[in-house]
Image (spheres, grey):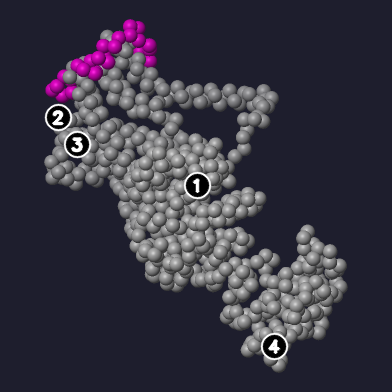
């Protein structure tokens, strides 16, 4: 690759080029505004009182900023019969997502490592079947999965939900890690074998330390999918084990009397916050990981 | 003494493709065995089989007198340097070198002293804290050597360790490896497709072609008495002249007749060769054809040849003459008066001649 940073000097631009550039920026800004509009409405609405929502305009800034709706959404609003806010369900989601992401990523890494570096008879077939698993629509597995969870004694429990998400995630995580590990020269594994290292030692000492970019990609992907999942959450949970997405739906649907838009908005933002956070913290690794090539020894 | 490495009737298939066929090789302690052959002939595969990184399809293999046919690489008491070096990218040079000892549970003090020893031997002390990505090709090559040397194994395996280096560094590292071998007295198996590397390093050479051993012997044997046309052509640069000729019995010896375009045939008399078939291919290295008067001996015969081309190459001058329909190269001294387009008496040293059967390519004398 050529290094442009040394020799690059900004060339003089003609007026036309400059105008074009500003037009471009203006257009990009417009698109960004368009995408940010709903978020803006959500945030402002959540900071208004019900009174103000009823009288004011949708896009107006709040006159008196109040966090009452947020605290109601977090710990007071009703989901069906119970009125303890999103909090218990938020923790359900955390308890479900964190282990599910961890397990699916770990299993995907080991699977990918085996398929890419320890070629065995039928490895391609198994990989093909796992890929196929990625593209089975959720709806198709609902009934068999419900039955399986029943047999395993996990029906309606958080471990049951973890189980479902791990199973469904393995296909993708295996694909990610396999494609990453395939680019690592086989001689690396051979050298480690001659050095006396075994299967897990090589994985732990040589492959995992190389894996940060793809781990970040996998974690973001899995976290977003599992946290945002609604269908499995609503199908395989019961009162007390529902994840936050299901609770959010119940809040919005079960309000009787006046619709508390501010509370709904605050609840929706709370439910979306963790995935946003993950992107902000690890987003730059996401792009890097997606485009990461192999490592030169 | 028992051979360090003993390979018997080794076969290796990938699926239904036979890659190695009936390999038999034995080497003694202190030997430097070089595997040569064209690309894709199975050199790396054979090395991987010796290391236990690839299972073998048939035959047996023992190292240090113990049967190792089904033993895993870590228990074979071998160390290997790979073509791409295969350094662990996330570990420092020091960690790369000590990884094997760490895995095997060698105590920290021993690791440290061994590391020091090898680092000073290879002059990489100042690189120990760096990552492989921050090293030049030659430095990486040294580190890869270091990783093998700390192990002090029965057998060293090298897979074209110099092929990624530029020509100058290659020559340098070549003589360093030779020195290393002499100082350590270690037994080594070395893969290369560079026949000069093979000649300079080996105590024993195995020439492979298409997974079949063509010849095993000392560099001198391989060079002077190639077993067939392939070996004759492959080893040596410039290559051996291989000239079609007719042989007829002449007293106790043989008369060799080489056809020439537009001139009387070149006739030589070999007093030693016996029982040659009528059609033969005569093999003579360029240095065994000299300017008349510069080579003496009872088997030297002089004949006038038409010179087609003169190529000065510093220390020597090569001249080319067409004999038997082939461009025949002779290696003359630098101050020769040879001129292209003129005739020149050339001395053929028949004490060095090889004869091959044109059909099978096998050696006849
Ligand atoms: N894993 C494999 N599966 C199938 N065929 C293979 C495999 N590895 C090597 N081969 C084939 O085996 C033959 C020998 O390969 P090998 O790598 O031993 O050649 P080589 O002599 O080391 O060549 P080079 O000088 O290019 O390194 C080649 O024809 C190659 O295509
Ligand atoms: Mg090779």
Q: Nearer the viewer, residue B262 or B318?
A: B318
Q: CA distance from mark 2 to mark 4?
A: 105 Å
Name which of mark 4 and mark 1 comes first in the sequence. Answer: 1
Name which of mark 3 and mark 2 comes first in the sequence. Answer: 3
The residue shown at (48%, 65%) is B28
Front tag of 2 and 1? 1
Query: Would you place residue A127 above or below residue B28 in this image?
Result: above
- Specify few, some or many for label 3: CA neighbours under 10 Å numbering under 14, 14-19, or 20 or more: some
Secondary structure under the numbered disc 1 in the rendered image: helix
Main secondary structure type of the part rendered in magenta: loop
Of all chains, the one bearing label 2 is: A
Q: Which label belongs to residue B254?
A: 4
Q: Which residue is mark 2?
A: A239
Q: Position of residue B233 (x, y in %)?
A: 63, 70
User: Within 8 Å: ligand 2 and the Cβ of disc 1?
Assistant: no
Q: CA distance from mark 4 to mark 1?
A: 56 Å
């Amino acid at each position: 690759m050529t290094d442009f940073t040394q020799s690059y000097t900004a060339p003089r631009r003609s007026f036309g080029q400059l105008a074009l550039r500003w037009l471009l920026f203006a257009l990009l800004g417009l698109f960004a505004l368009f995408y940010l509009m709903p978020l803006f409405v959500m945030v402002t609405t959540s900071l208004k009182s019900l009174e103000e929502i009823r009288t004011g305009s949708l896009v107006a800034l709040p006159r008196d900023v109040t966090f009452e709706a947020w605290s109601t959404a977090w710990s007071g609003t009703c989901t069906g019969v119970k009125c303890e806010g999103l909090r218990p369900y938020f923790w359900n989601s955390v308890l479900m997502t964190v282990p599910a992401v961890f397990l699916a990523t770990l299993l995907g890494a080991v699977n990918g490592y085996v398929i890419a570096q320890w070629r065995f008879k039928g490895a391609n077939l198994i990989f093909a079947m796992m890929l196929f698993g990625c593209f089975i629509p959720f709806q198709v597995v609902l009934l068999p999965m419900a039955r399986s969870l029943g047999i395993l004694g996990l029906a309606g429990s958080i471990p049951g939900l973890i189980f479902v998400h791990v199973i469904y995630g393995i296909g993708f995580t295996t694909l990610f890690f396999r494609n990453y590990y395939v680019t690592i020269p086989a001689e690396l594994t051979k050298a480690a074998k001659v050095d006396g290292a075994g299967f897990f030692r090589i994985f732990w000492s040589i492959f995992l330390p190389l894996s940060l970019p793809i781990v970040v990609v996998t974690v973001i992907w899995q976290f977003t999918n599992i946290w945002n999942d609604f269908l499995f959450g609503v199908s395989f949970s019961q009162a007390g084990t529902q994840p936050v997405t299901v609770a959010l739906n119940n809040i919005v649907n079960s309000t009787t009397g006046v619709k508390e838009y501010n509370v709904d908005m605050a609840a929706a933002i709370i439910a979306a916050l963790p995935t946003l956070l993950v992107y902000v913290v690890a987003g730059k690794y996401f792009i890097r990981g997606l485009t990461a090539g192999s490592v030169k020894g | 003494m028992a051979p360090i490495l003993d390979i018997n009737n080794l076969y290796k298939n990938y699926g239904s493709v036979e890659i190695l066929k009936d390999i038999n090789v034995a080497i003694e302690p202190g030997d430097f065995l070089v595997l040569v052959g064209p690309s894709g002939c199975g050199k790396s595969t054979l090395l991987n089989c010796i290391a236990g990184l690839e299972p073998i399809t048939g035959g047996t293999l023992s190292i240090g007198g113990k049967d190792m046919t089904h033993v895993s690489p870590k228990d074979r008491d071998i160390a290997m340097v790979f073509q791409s070096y295969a350094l662990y990218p996330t570990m420092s040079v020091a960690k790369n070198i000590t990884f094997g000892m760490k895995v095997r549970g060698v105590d920290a003090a021993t690791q440290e002293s061994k590391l020091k020893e090898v680092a000073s031997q290879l002059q990489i002390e100042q690189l120990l804290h760096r990552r492989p990505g921050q090293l030049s090709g030659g430095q990486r090559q040294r580190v890869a050597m270091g990783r093998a040397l700390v192990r002090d194994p029965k057998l060293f395996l090298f897979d074209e360790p110099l092929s990624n280096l530029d020509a100058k560094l290659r020559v340098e590292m070549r003589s360093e490896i030779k020195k290393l071998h002499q100082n350590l007295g270690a037994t080594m198996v070395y893969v290369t497709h560079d026949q000069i590397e093979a000649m300079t390093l080996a105590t024993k050479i195995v020439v492979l072609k298409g997974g079949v051993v063509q010849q095993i012997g000392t560099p001198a044997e391989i060079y002077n008495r190639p077993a067939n046309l392939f070996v004759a052509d492959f080893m040596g640069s410039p290559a051996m002249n291989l000239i079609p000729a007719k042989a007829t019995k002449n007293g106790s010896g043989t008369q060799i007749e080489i056809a020439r375009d537009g001139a009387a045939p070149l006739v030589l008399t070999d007093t030693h060769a016996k029982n040659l078939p009528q059609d033969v291919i005569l093999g003579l290295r360029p240095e065994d054809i000299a300017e008349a008067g510069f080579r003496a001996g009872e088997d030297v015969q002089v004949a006038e040849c038409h010179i087609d081309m003169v190529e000065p190459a510093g220390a020597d001058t090569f001249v080319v003459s067409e004999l038997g329909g082939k461009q025949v190269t002779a290696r003359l001294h630098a101050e020769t008066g040879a001129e292209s387009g003129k005739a020149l008496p050339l001395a053929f040293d028949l004490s060095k001649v090889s004869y091959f059967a044109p059909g099978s390519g096998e050696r006849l004398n």
